[in-house]
Amino acid sequence: MQTELSHYSCELAERDIAQQSYRRARERLSQALEFDQKSVRATLLRAQIAMNESNWRAAIKEFKQIPSQDPLFMSEVIPDLQRCYAELNLLNDFATLMKQWLSKSPSTSVMLAIAEQVLEQQGAYAAGAFITDELKKRPSIKGFNRLIDLYIAHASKGANESLMVLRGLTGQLEQSKPVYQCRRCGFSGKSLHWQCPSCQNWGSTKPIVGLEGE
């Protein structure tokens, strides 16, 4: 029941956010976290409000709560979290945080965020080597596809054509796979539903992990 009440408060908060009633939304979200302190949804909505108000440091503070609430959702926050650090001109701090997250709760999305920093600072070879080492520990289709992309950008013409064919096949494989799955009934899809469309359970749908996911 506590989980259901938490999501109900989040539903009301989302309506308030749409109306830019941020004060009321914050009250709803505080209530949501009282019902369920592990509510990722409530924390994400608090971060959304902070970003809407260009309060980047407050948003970062909220995003940093996600790993302790449910590390499976770290992949959901990376683009917005990176934007917050970029707005503050603190991308080095973002890279440091990603390394900390990777060491505590390995995730393909986190690994690829680090790889992009390595690519920018050290070049394609170093980025490729980093991804290769990480894929040995945690293979994933998404990580493999990024590695192929790096090779395509720097391969000879003959090798490039072969890699393009391979990338097309693996890309189709990645696109055909679901991203989220309900832990109760097994329903899967590409969109995150806080209430499972199949079994109607609240909060049981999460990102898929493993070779075909994170």
Image (spheres, rainbow, N blue to C red):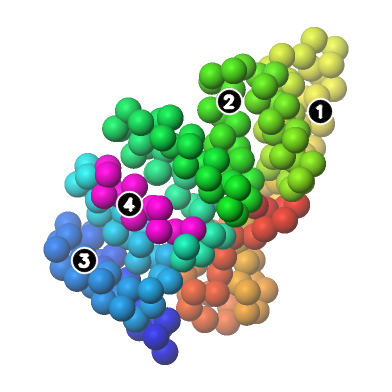
Local secondary structure at mark 3:
helix
Callout 2 environment at 10 Å: few (<14), some (14 to 19), or many (20+)?
many
Instruction: Find residue 4 and name its label.
Output: none
C-alpha gap between disc 4 and disc 2: 25 Å
In this orientation, which residue lies closer to the viewer: 81 or 95? Answer: 95
First in sequence: mark 3 vs mark 2: 3
Instruction: Find residue 165 and name its label.
Output: 1
C-alpha gap between disc 4 and disc 1: 43 Å
Rendered position, 184 above or below 45: below
Rendered position, 179 above or below 116: below
Q: Are marks 4 and 2 in contact (CB under 8 Å)?
A: no
Pointer 4 residue: 61
In the rendered structure, does residue 59 fall within the stretch colored magenta? yes
C-alpha gap between disc 3 and disc 2: 39 Å
Local secondary structure at mark 2:
helix
Quadrant where the N terminus sits is: bottom left
Is residue 165 rendered to the left or right of residue 46?
A: right
Measured as percent of width and height from the top left, residue 124 is found at 65, 19
